[in-house]
Image (cartoon, helix red, strand yellow):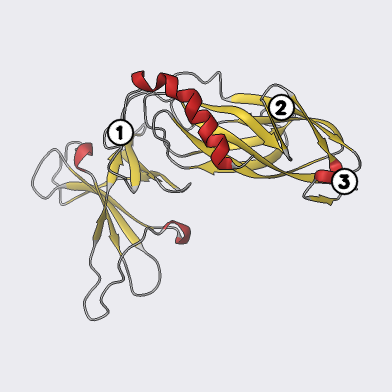
Amino acid sequence: MKSSTLLSALMLALAANAATAQTAPGSSANPDYSYRIDRDAAGAYLVTLTSFHGPFHYRDMALTPQGCGASPGSPITSAAELWLFPQPTGVLSAEFRVPASSGGSCRFSTTFDLKAEDRPQHEEPDPESPPQGQKLQLWEMPDSPTDLSAADPVQIGPTPTQWGSTAVVPAAQADARRNGLCYFAYSYLSTNAGPGHAEGTSNALTLSAPGGPLLALDDLPAQLPMSATVVDGRIGLPSGISVVVVEVDAPAYVPETSETNNVRRVVVDVQGSCN
């Protein structure tokens, strides 16, 4: 089953609840990044940025007062801006800026370099003029709760099944066989069924139990309320019966209304030799 079919199946299932789902502010604005601002134990402000179009995170970056007196106040989070500074060559510099409540030119900011894989599309700067800053659209993470989980169907090998069931997979249908393991493609739906916007995080596939031998670790992008992301990849399993466990939000990074539905299991019976 193709991933687009998996997604359609889930969205049909969620459609019954769509009338009561809240829409996060700015959901139609096609944001480039989502962000949230926290305070650490010492009272300093930290910002976490998540690329909305891909699984890249810039976590817990310190916000430093700039152009402020002794009492900068607090960040005005709703007025935050993300600026990019394209260079003719080399890295893409970025600066996150937040006006301070003390007013004037005082602001909180942090500078960093975007990862090479996380460069948003932008116009090439004119080599005859100095690089100009480009402001990207940001989406402040609302306080509405999220509810992350893995949804049916799950597919390991050629046949879709459900979490909590047993999948019988012939070793002859493996994509590859090496060192006593059969390698199969997998896919499942990682959902946010809560009314809040979920920050990017990671899901783990492990063997036997949460925290068991790691089979795969998948980064997830930010998720809208009542939405789903198709997670796929390839894992290696031995002949015989294995228990494959998914732990959604494995680092427990996203605050949720319930953490009890983050772990699901499927029994996989690989029949035949993987040598």
Dot 3 lies on which element?
Answer: loop
Q: Which residue is mark 2?
A: 266
Q: Who comes first in sequence, dot 2 or dot 3?
A: 3
Q: Which residue is mark 3?
A: 180
Drawn side of residue 139 relative to residue 254, left or right:
left
Residue 214 percent location from the top left of the image: 69, 39
Q: Quadrant of the N terminus?
A: top right
Residue 87 percent location from the top left of the image: 33, 71
Q: Nearer the viewer, mark 2 or mark 3?
A: 2
Residue, far left:
104
The structure residue drawn at horizontal position 51% and vertical position 34%, both measured from the top left corner, is: 8
Residue 233 percent location from the top left of the image: 64, 45
The structure residue drawn at horizontal position 46% and vertical position 24%, both measured from the top left corner, is: 14
Up/down of 116 relative to 145, above or below? below
Disc number placed over residue 172 in the picture, else none: none
Disc 1 marks a residue whose amino acid type is: Gly
Q: In front here: 112 or 275?
A: 275
Q: Nearer the viewer, mark 1 or mark 2?
A: 2
Disc 2 marks a residue whose amino acid type is: Val
Dot 1 lies on which element?
Answer: loop
- The alpha-carbon separation of the residues under discs 1 and 2 comes to 44 Å
Q: Who comes first in sequence, dot 3 or dot 1?
A: 1
Question: Does the residue at mark 3 contact the one at mark 1 (Cβ under 8 Å)?
Answer: no
Q: In front here: 128 or 69?
A: 128
Disc number placed over residue 43 in the picture, else none: 1
